[in-house]
Amino acid sequence: MPEHRGSVETGTAASGALPLIGRRRELQALGALFAHGSRVLVLGPRGIGKTRLIQESAAAGGISLLSLGARGSLHEFLQELLPLAGLETIPSDSVRTLSSQALQSRVLAALQARPRWLWIDDPAPAGARLYRFLQRVLWIQGCGLAVCAQNREQLGYLGRLLWDPREEVRLRPLARRDAARLVGEAMKASGLESRGCSEEFRRQVLDAAAGNPGRIVTLCRLAAQPQYWHGGRLMFAPLWIDTLTQLA
């Protein structure tokens, strides 16, 4: 699961991140949706950069996001959301004892007092009850819904809220030139240049990752670990297998 889940994002991108390369057009499109709309859907396969794009766009626009996990059940969703949306600290034991109706009332009151965007990353297919609750959230002035998913089939009933293609940003693989720039940045950040990684490694990463930023970054990060080296040579096959496993 992405590390941001269950936390409050306040429009600040993660420090120390690699440069966002090759996404200027998508960043502008997403920024316009945050500024002038209330619904955003970012689509693309794992590792393509959906989460990073949301973070960067929110940071640029000063958008406050409440980041939530992949909940298909309304009750679980509300239990996670209430401590984030609440205006005061709520003990977890108290949250667990509240009914769905009571949770809804308290969450809606908190969002009316301080409107914010809800951000659901990699959702479980949503049911009708969650859909109807999010409808009520979107009736609140200043509230919005951002969803990152691999495809529309993953949305379930959320697809009824995010039906408009004008509110959709679809991420495709990086162009090879941009992917090569990212490989260079990732190698530098992982200390691989000082270890003497060859041009062959750069080519292998470019060919295997096929423009997927997450694969590029994971390959370079793992390549810095000693278990992938033998006799002064980097073993690419197990490195690639572990990269695919981590991004599965």
Image: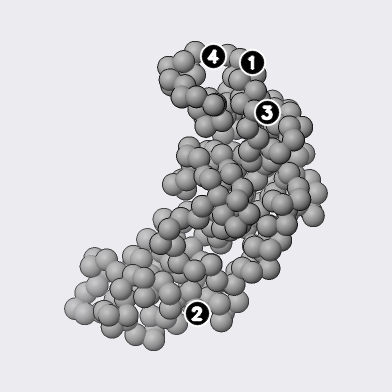
Q: Residues within 10 Å of mark 3 (few under 14, many from 20)?
A: some
Label 4 and label 3: CA atoms lie apart by: 20 Å
Mark before the other along the chain sequence, 2 or 1: 1
Helix, strand or loop at disc 3?
helix
Label 3 and label 1: CA atoms lie apart by: 17 Å
Q: Mark 4 = which residue?
A: 98
Tell me the quarter of the picture where residue 144 sits: top right
Res. 244 in view: yes
Residue 172: x and y in percent read 64, 66
> Would you say the residues marked 1 and 4 are in contact, meaning their CB atoms lie under 8 Å apart?
no
Q: Amino acid at mark 2?
A: Ala
> Which is more foreground, mark 2 or mark 3?
3
Q: Amino acid at mark 1?
A: Gln
Residue 65: x and y in percent read 58, 43
Q: Residues within 10 Å of mark 2 (few under 14, many from 20)?
A: some
Q: Amino acid at mark 4?
A: Leu
Q: Is residue 153 above or below residue 31?
A: above
Residue drawn at 21 percent across, 74 percent down:
230
Residue 147: x and y in percent read 64, 46
Res. 131 in view: no
Residue drawn at 36 percent across, 66 percent down:
221
Label 1 and label 4: CA atoms lie apart by: 8 Å
Q: Mark 1 = which residue?
A: 101
Q: Is residue 140 above or below residue 183?
A: above
Label 2 and label 4: CA atoms lie apart by: 52 Å
Mark before the other along the chain sequence, 4 or 3: 4
Residue drawn at 36 percent across, 75 percent down:
188
